[in-house]
Amino acid sequence: MADPASYRPQTGEIPTNPGVYRFRDPHGRVIYVGKAKSLRSRLNSYFANPAGLLPKTHAMVHTASSVEWTVVGSELESLQLEYTWIKEYKPRFNVVFRDDKTYPYLALTMSEKLPRVQVMRGDRRKGTRYFGPYTAGAIRETMDTLLRVFPVRSCSAGVLKRAQASGRPCLLGYIDKCSAPCVGRVTPEEHRALAEDFCAFMGGEAKRFITKLEKEMADAVGTLDYERAARLRDDISALRKVFERNAVVLADDTDADVFALHEDELEAAVQVFHVRGGRIRGQRGWVVEKVEDTTTPDLVEHLLQQVYGDDGDSHGRLPREVLVPVEPSNAAELTEWLGGLRGAKVDVRVPQRGDKAALMSTVRENAEHALKLHKTRRAGDLTVRSQALQELQEALDLPVALLRIECFDVSHVQGTNVVASMVVVEDGLPKKSEYRKFSVTGAAAADDTAAMHDVLTRRFRHYLQDKSAQSEASALPGHQAALEAAAAAVLDTTTAAPRAKFAYPPNLVVVDGGKPQVNAAARALADLGIEDVYVVGLAKRLEEVWLPDSDFPVILPRTSQGLYLLQRIRDEAHRFAITFHRQKRGKAMTVSALDGVPGLGESKRKTLLTHFGSVKGVKAATAAELTAAKGIGPSLANAIVAYFSGDDTAGDALPAVNMATGEIIET
């Protein structure tokens, strides 16, 4: 661990202006981002008496090896820059609210030609409208009830294609719970109108639809069409059943998000009720690990930054009122920022009495139950992960904790289409955003050991290059000016943040294989001069663990949690490599005579085949005829003619065949 005195800046060097500061670890990774009204006062508080800091802050300043800051013009700018950098760098010592994915949502895929209604969990998708969340039983019942009145497609893409091919709808089409756009009962435009009505009903316009159906029922009775009147009566009953599930809790004109939290020394749970038109339209939850010493007002500030900065429009709009349990830090600047996002005034306040205070109490009870449930579910998982990492560290006699593990695997079929995968595990959990794929070509594809050496060399060469670039940047006299320029670029929303190639290096590298693969990986690290990364291999046959330059493997007990962890990592790397290999092999299996024409890409090949009907037609065309096809210029046309004139049988010998099935694609 670093000594804070080794990188403490001189007091006179730190400005007294408002700004944002970043702590970095020895690998250059940002581990904490903070803001301050006075940078000098805030940063001095970290270094004045490190021994007196609270445990998590003490761990942060001793993990860091440098600190840098950026001066901004106002506290509002510091709020914006802090949020932007937390989102970009994801520092491990900052508060990050993890969205609760426990509850399912009712979703309509409005981006599709034929919108589909379905139950969805997990991350939100662009072009999809979400309603809820609901409990698992209630959402199925709600969906089944509404399909009676709004028969929107609910089948999968595969079922839709089969129905379109056969000309017969699925069962839901026969029982009138789908309007069957697949067979032309309604046009795509009529089906989209049904989906829009579905969304409008779920968005709070239920009374309009109920009134409309009541009028139609009265007209049916007036014309003595009692069967239709009975169907409409049942439809009205179904809509009322769904409508009455959302109880009125506030005045009809109230649009508000009501936040409450329950916390202990280590974690906090947050719940929010989304109230629209006086009714509770949705509920969400987050759990946060308090990895920094944070007060409740700071937690509320970070919560509102993340919720509305990431997806403030996911529920239609940012509401007029945001009700919170305590006033957030920097309340004036935060309110101004939220008003800018909404384009109108936003009132952030703490309800003191009346219906809103009573609703806040209900939300707080939900947060308390959510934290209890989270701790119950997580206790066993945390225990097992900690036990696995500790067992592995002890069995391999490693001097460092295994905070980050990377596993590599090579995949091919008899030496063709050689690829490799890198999967990442942090604190015993996979970090899929940092998985990487490698294509291996040339001499490196000769065998598994050469491929492993090549992949490890490429991965850690990137790390050394990034490290060197950071060292050079830190040594420049205008380093602080460069940071301020970078901050201005971040505040400019038109500038996209650069995508990181690789994160900081792992404590342990795991390779799929035995002694040869391990020695190849160790040799790659030695050639690059890297000595602080440890390497092991896991052989499939007896699940033994191999160390570099060792004649005998380490045998872990079959019931060892450390062995289970290694097996899960190895299997994940194998799955990721196999998936990439199949994709690459599938592309290589379809070949065409046009593939060899220099300068002719995939889109123009398709254009030529569409224009001339076949490879044979392209081959017989003159340069002038080729230029008649869209996107084909004189130079490319001459290149095509020259290519086929050099091989008169090219078009007949290689007529675009799928080499896996033997199917002739072009005739």
Image: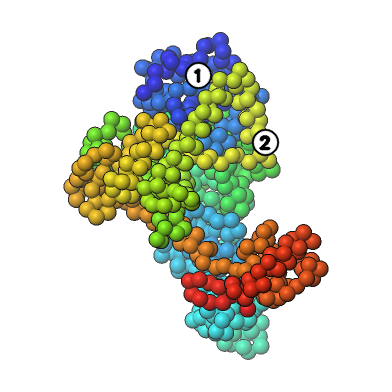
Three-letter amino acid code at disc 1?
Leu
Q: 148 or 458: nearer the eye? A: 458
Q: Which residue is mark 2?
A: 492
Three-letter amino acid code at disc 2?
Asp
Q: Can I make out residue 133 in this image?
A: yes
Task: Name the quadrant of the C terminus.
Answer: bottom right
Q: Can I make out residue 45 in this image?
A: no
Q: Which residue is at 41% across, 30% downward?
A: 529
Looking at the image, tell me whether mark 2 or mark 1 is earlier in sequence order. 1
Q: Identify whether 243 is placed above or below 553.
A: below
Q: Residue furthest right?
A: 624
Say few, some or many: other residues with alpha carbon within 10 Å of mark 2 (under 14 / 14 to 19 / 20 or more).
Answer: few
Q: Which residue is mark 1?
A: 43
Q: 653 or 45: nearer the eye? A: 653
The secondary structure type at the circle numbered 1 is helix
| Residue 128 in picture, x, y percent from top left | 58, 59
